Structures are given as C-alpha cells and as structure tokens.
Amino acid sequence: MQVIRSNRKTASLQVNRNAELIVRVPLLASDAEVQRILRLKHDWITQKIELMQARQAERAPNGKLEQLLYLGKSYRVDYIQDTRPYVSLQDHFIVSNLGTEQLRQFMPQWYQMYGIRYMQARIVELSKLHGFPTPRVKITKAVSKWGSCSTAGRVCFSWRLLMAAPEIIDYVIIHELSHLIHQDHSPAFWAHVQSIVPDYKKHYKWLKEHGHLLNL
Ligand SMILES: [Zn+2]
C-alpha cells in the first residue's frame, strides 16, 4: 500500500493495474484517519484488489510476451537473433534482438506505425459509406481511452485498439466519427451510433469487460 499526502481536500482510493492500493489524502491527515478510511472502505478495497489480481493473471501468465494480438488475432512470438533489432509480422511475430521487456517498451510504437494504414483505410471507407466528413487520423500512445475526437475534426485512437477485432474497431471508429456531428454522449449521439451499428451495445460491453486484455 502507498499513502500519498498532498495538497488536496478529500481522500481517494485507487487500486492500480498491478493490484496495489494507493491512498491519496490531504497533507495533514493522520495515520488514524487513514486507518479509518481503510476500515470504512474495506469491502470495496478487497473486491477491487481481487479484480485487479484476476486481470493481472489473465494479462501476463508468466510475464513473458509469447503471444501478441493484432486485429483480434493472437499471434505467436518467435524471439530470434539477427544482425539488427526489429519486429516483423508474418504468419507470426518475429522479434529480433529484443528481450520481453524491450519488446513491451517498443510495441506501442509498432502498433502506431503498422496500424495507421489499416485505420486510415477503414476510416475513409466508413466515412464515405455513412456520409461523414473524412477526418485526419492519428494513433496515439494513450492507454486509458480507446478514441477521441477534436473539434478541429481529427480523430485519435489508442494503439491498444489495434489489438481488438475488426468489428470492435469499427464500432469505436463510428463512435468517434459520430462525435464529429454530436460532441456529447446525448441520446441523439447514441441514436446516431445505433443507426449505423445496431448492435453497438454488445461491442461497448465487450470493451468494458475485456478491454483490459488488449494490453501488453
Ligand atoms: Zn464518446
């Protein structure tokens, strides 16, 4: 457990993706006060830690990256020694001169570089098909959001989305394209999404429940 005292007015609890509890409290909060919060939130903390531990176990059974996802398919990773470091996707991933940790560091960039063409093509296709203006596209290093849309008409997607199945990616694309018309999550926005992706709720739910698996 980590207790962080800072210039804030209220306490907050967080269990991070490594299943560690982080307690943020005001500067002058006493240890007794921290203990009181822990007792009060005991059930929530226990549940959250169990959930994050389960996710952690699903995510990395032994810490080594032996499989990588791309467009919803799981590919085996072969580690080889060659003249220079690289990552190449054939019918499986070939990883040259990189260990698991280096690969973990490098892969977001790989998804950005390799995935941009897929995303661009799909966005051109979907925006033509459904009458959206074709926006500029960027794949970002964002980890906590699947996509975003700027008022300047640019849509951004997290590199992690490239791990998802094509129909999930399509839903997120339509979601962001619909924000070019509705800048909020109003009923009108969702009605627009639904008119194009009738079963969008299924994809939305999948991302909520399984999105954590789209990670390294
Ligand atoms: Zn949205």
Image: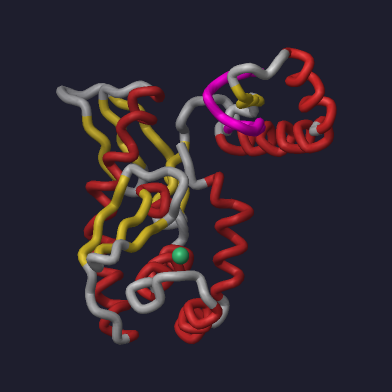
Relative to residue 100, is residue 49 drawn left or right? right
Q: Is 2 contained in the magenta span?
A: yes
Position of residue 141 relative to residue 13, above or below, is below
Asked if residue 41 is among those painted magenta in the image, a careful observer would answer no
> Where residue 142 sits: x, y (%)?
37, 45
Q: How is the image coloured?
A: secondary structure
Tell me where residue 174 appears, x and y as whole percent.
40, 73
Where residue 207 sits, quadrant-wise, is bottom right
Residue drawn at (30%, 26%) of the image: 80
Is residue 197 visible to us here?
no
- What are the residue bounds of the magenta stretch? 1-16
Query: Is residue 64 among what the camera can see?
Result: yes
Residue name at image x 83 percent, y 31 percent = 40
Left/right placement of residue 92 relative to residue 48 reads left
Point out the image quarter for the N terminus.
top right
Position of residue 171 relative to residue 8, above or below, is below
Q: In which quarter of the image is residue 9?
A: top right
Q: How many labels does the image show?
A: 0
Judged from this view, the residue extending furthest toward the left is 83
Is residue 86 or residue 141 the one in the foreground? 141
Name the spot of residue 201 as percent of width and height, x first.
Answer: 59, 71
Percent of width and height locating residue 84 = 17, 25
Front-most of 9 and 90?
A: 9
Who's the residue at 22% across and 59% down the image?
117
Tell me which residue sits at (27%, 77%) in the image.
125
Q: Left or right: 161 with respect to 41?
A: left
User: Depth check: 154 or 58 in front?
Assistant: 154
Depth check, front residue: 65 or 102: 102
